[in-house]
């Protein structure tokens, strides 16, 4: 939950910088997109923490995939917006795949959890 909170903090900071500090339109777009995805997945990590405490086994795996995906996806966009080398943009699709894997893991965990409970 600490990492989710820190991720949300970074998302707000990046979004604010994109809205008020970045002059370049492309940089603003990268910051906005990164902040949006990072915030959504910070909240998803909070949900995973709650689900894990409720006994949903795979929720922790989904949380780690969300955190890693956010780091790579949003982080690469932030780096580009701050003038980093274009080669860093190659990390964004990998991060996106990790985010997708997180949602798939969460769906599988929810499905497996409903199948193991008696009606």
Image (cartoon, rainbow, N blue to C red):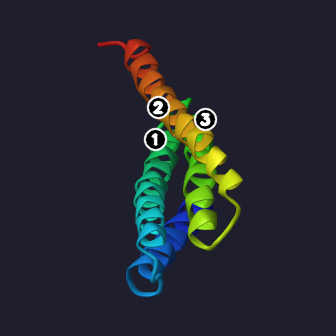
- Which residue lies most toward the left here? 119
Mark 1 or mark 3: name the one nearer the start of the chain. 1
Query: Which corner quadrant of the image does residue 119 belong to?
Result: top left
The residue that mark 2 highlights is: 106
Residue 81, given in percent of the width and then of the height, sits at 56, 69
Residue 60 in view here: no
Q: Nearer the viewer, residue 25 or 18?
A: 25
Mark 1 or mark 2: name the one nearer the start of the chain. 1
Q: Nearer the viewer, residue 64 or 60?
A: 64
The residue that mark 1 highlights is: 51
Residue 18, given in percent of the width and then of the height, sits at 44, 77
Q: Mark 2 touching mark 3, by CB under 8 A?
A: no
Q: Residues within 10 Å of mark 3 (few under 14, many from 20)?
A: some
Q: Is residue 19 left or right of residue 57?
A: left
Q: Tell which tag, 1 or 3, sits nearer the viewer.
A: 3
Which corner quadrant holds the N terminus? bottom right
Q: How far is mark 2 from mark 3, CA to CA?
A: 8 Å
Q: Which mark is residue 30?
A: none
Q: Mark 1 touching mark 2, by CB under 8 A?
A: yes
Q: Residues within 10 Å of mark 2 (few under 14, many from 20)?
A: many
Q: How far is mark 1 from mark 3, CA to CA?
A: 11 Å
Q: Residue at x 46, y 39 (%)?
A: 54
Q: Residue at x 42, y 26 (%)?
A: 107
Query: Which corner quadrant of the image does residue 33 belong to?
Result: bottom left
Q: Residues within 10 Å of mark 1 (few under 14, many from 20)?
A: some
Mark 2 or mark 3: name the one nearer the start of the chain. 3
The residue that mark 3 highlights is: 61
The number of numbered badges drawn on the structure is: 3
Q: Nearer the viewer, residue 83 or 111?
A: 83
């Amino acid at each position: 939950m600490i990492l989710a909170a820190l991720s949300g903090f970074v998302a707000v900071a990046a979004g604010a910088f994109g809205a008020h500090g970045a002059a370049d339109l492309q940089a603003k777009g990268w910051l906005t997109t990164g902040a949006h995805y990072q915030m959504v997945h910070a909240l998803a990590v909070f949900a995973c923490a709650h689900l894990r405490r409720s006994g949903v086994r795979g929720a922790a795996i989904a949380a780690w995939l969300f955190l890693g995906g956010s780091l790579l996806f949003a982080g690469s966009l932030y780096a580009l917006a701050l003038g980093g080398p274009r080669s860093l943009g190659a990390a964004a699709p990998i991060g996106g795949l990790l985010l997708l894997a997180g949602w798939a893991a969460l769906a599988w965990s929810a499905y497996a959890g409903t199948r193991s409970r008696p009606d």
